[in-house]
């Protein structure tokens, strides 16, 4: 059990257009519970937080109705990326929080024990940034969805992380890398809040990406490392087909 020096931010403001539904993606049910409900429950069950901060859109009434006062809320008025969404939580997260964990409302498979490991590694190593990674054996089925994940590029001599390269920016050689970014992060709170305003939106989507903070930390010589988890825990839900796969995986887990 960890005390209240850890804050948890859960990003749940996206609309999920591929779901072809008026209901926000995070409120679609998986095994009888909204996606974001699984994420909140797993965060609380991990013991690192009693009341996570959920970042919602200005139209997040269904999320608010579901959780009531079980969570704190921050509002992302415009959908300008994961960095922008995390920044929306700045004034809501407890001032006592020395470390911030960022999770996603549409990634319900991450287990409480894995959230614990992310935080323990982060604090144990005195990291500024800790990223959770997965390593897949190939990009053939059932690992095809992971081909779209960012690649973890390491220094061949030291093994240290040098950067995360998004799939669309990868060279042919980098596309072959099987260690991938899940986008689950733990940050030192002071460093996060002082650097999140430095993010740039100079990319095709004109969005502020949380992952870009890792490069800022590396460029500054900050302590950065990774903790690995099982690929199935990094499964995102982006389509009706993904729901079917996740339902099967969750049923097997609960058997």
Image (cartoon, grey):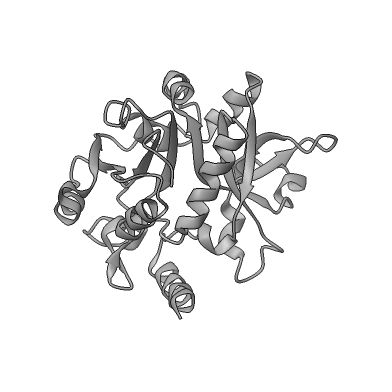
Q: Nearer the viewer, residue 147 or 163?
A: 163
Can residue 178 be spotted in the picture? yes
Q: Residue at x 54, y 31 (%)?
A: 212
Can residue 130 be spotted in the picture? no
Residue 72: quadrant of the picture: top left
Q: Residue at x 55, y 49 (%)?
A: 117
Q: Position of residue 233 (x, y in %)?
A: 52, 60
Q: Residue at x 18, y 45 (%)?
A: 59
In this picture, is 253 found above or below 128? below
Q: Position of residue 112 (x, y in %)?
A: 45, 56
141 on left or right of 118: right
126 on left or right of 37: right
Residue 151: quadrant of the picture: top right
Q: Position of residue 82 (x, y in %)?
A: 41, 38
Q: Residue at x 63, y 42 (%)?
A: 226
Q: Nearer the viewer, residue 88 or 168?
A: 88
In this picture, is 104 found above or below 83? below
Q: Position of residue 51 (x, y in %)?
A: 28, 44
Question: Count of labels shown?
Answer: 0
In this picture, is 31 found above or below 110? below
Q: Nearer the viewer, residue 20 or 102?
A: 102
The residue at the far right in this view is 157
The residue at the far bottom in this view is 255
Q: Nearer the viewer, residue 41 or 36?
A: 41
């Amino acid at each position: 059990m960890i005390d209240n020096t850890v804050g948890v931010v859960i990003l749940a403001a996206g609309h999920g257009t591929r779901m072809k539904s008026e209901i926000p993606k995070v409120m679609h049910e998986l095994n009888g519970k909204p996606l974001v409900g699984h994420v909140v429950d797993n965060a609380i069950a991990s013991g690192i937080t009693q009341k996570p901060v959920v970042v919602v859109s200005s139209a997040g009434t269904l999320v608010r109705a579901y959780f009531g006062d079980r969570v704190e809320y921050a509002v992302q008025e415009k959908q300008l990326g994961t960095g922008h969404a995390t920044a929306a939580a700045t004034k809501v997260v407890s001032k006592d929080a020395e470390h911030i964990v960022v999770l996603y409302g549409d990634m319900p498979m991450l287990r409480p024990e894995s959230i614990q490991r992310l935080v323990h590694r982060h604090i144990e190593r005195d990291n500024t940034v800790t990223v959770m990674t997965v390593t897949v054996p190939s990009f053939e089925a059932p690992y095809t969805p992971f081909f779209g994940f960012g690649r973890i590029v390491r220094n061949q001599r030291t093994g240290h992380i040098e950067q995360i390269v998004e799939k669309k920016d990868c060279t042919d050689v980098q596309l072959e890398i099987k260690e991938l970014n899940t986008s689950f992060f733990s940050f030192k709170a002071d460093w996060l809040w002082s650097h999140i305003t430095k993010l740039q939106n100079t990319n095709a989507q004109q969005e502020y990406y949380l992952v870009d903070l890792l490069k800022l930390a590396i460029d500054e010589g900050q302590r950065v490392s990774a903790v690995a988890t099982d690929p199935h825990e990094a499964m995102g839900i982006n389509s009706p087909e993904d729901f079917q796969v996740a339902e099967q995986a969750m049923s097997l887990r609960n058997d």
